[in-house]
Amino acid sequence: MARPTSKDVARSAGVSQAAVSLVLGDKWRGRVSETTAERVRAAARDLGYRPNLAARNLRLGSTRTALLVVPALTNDFFARVYTGAARIAAAHDFGVVLYPSPDGIGPAKDPFASARSALDGVIASSMAAGALTDIRGADLPLVMLDSDPADTTAAAHVNVDLADGMRRMTAHLLGLGHRRFLHLAAAVDSWTFSVRAEAIARTLSEAPDATLRTAHAPLSVHGARAAAEAALTTPGPRPTAVICDDDIIAAGACKAVRRQGLRIPHDISVAGFDDLALSTAVDPELTTIRLPAELVGERGMQALLHVLEGKEPQNDALPVELVVRDSTAPPAS
């Protein structure tokens, strides 16, 4: 059976195709009567008519499609960001294409022959705006997630309160009695990790008897384990608490601690960040900072919609939560 057309709906309702377009495009008020509008809607329902969105969007100069660029898909934080963005997009008849940048936080290659002709906007998580030049050119609105709010090339920013998260984690460990700290920092030059490092240092500066060492680790369990082993075997007093930039690094730190014949949290407390699924897969489960990843995605899509509509998007930082589990405890000495 042939798919019904707008001409079929017009014939069934006894109106013109222009009237059908106005009603189904929700632009009929003041132009056709309520009775006529209802007659068109009833005819469309009876015939099972669905508008050709591709043709409509082509006429309107809009594809109703957003591109979400992330550094990688190996971190479930980005999967949850996508889930939130897609939920809001679907409610507004938008689609979201997920694109993991092949070079991580480096320059993102254009995934289409001409991305600007296929997109209405770009949302990018945990990347620098300059890395997206090939994709968006100077034409597409850009919404940045978990990125430097001082970057004015973006039309909107959505961030979580990373500094508050690291303050809470550091204060939690200080409250347990820890004074010798190791910060196992991500070996990635990006705003999001700089904020975490600054918050740890600032919080510990308020505890005169606290000491802090920093070691840099790749964003992988294996790489973080090697970096943590090197840091823990460095001459000098051993740290009693390890604060990690994310849960993947923390998992590597846990392996390193065990390889040294030490126990968590009895000999060393280990803390993560992000509250990935991994945080409850390790033993003991990680004390970490929970980020509202799905809400970040929702806010990002809402911000893009606001920009496209000429509205002012929300820009307040989203709150985080300290999740205390079994990997942290008072120091033994």
Image (spheres, grey):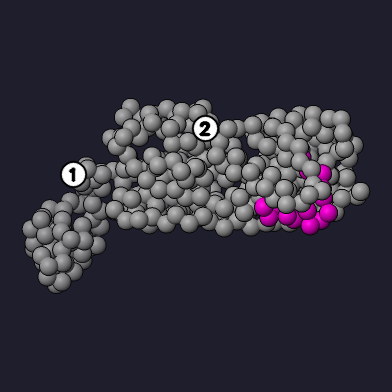
Quarter occupied by residue 16 = bottom left
Marks 1 and 2, the one that precedes in the sequence = 1
State the residue at coordinates (73%, 36%). 214
Quarter occupied by residue 67 = top left
Is residue 331 one of those drawn in magenta?
no
Q: Where does residue 223 sit, x and y in percent of width and height?
A: 71, 29
Q: Nearer the viewer, residue 59 or 69?
A: 69
Numbered label attached to residue 105: 2
Q: Which residue is mark 1?
A: 59
Q: Give the structural element (helix, strand or loop) at label 2.
A: loop
Q: How many marks?
A: 2
221 with respect to 301 (left or right): right
Highlighted range, magenta: 167-182
| Res 156 seen here | yes
3D distance between C-alphas at marks 1 and 2: 36 Å
State the residue at coordinates (68%, 37%). 185
Q: Give the structural element (helix, strand or loop) at label 1.
A: helix
Is residue 181 one of those drawn in magenta?
yes
For label 1, count other residues whose C-alpha is less than 10 Å away and answer few (under 14), some (14-19) or many (20+): few
Quarter occupied by residue 306 = bottom left
- Residue 103, compared with residue 29, is above or below; it is above
Numbered label attached to residue 122: none
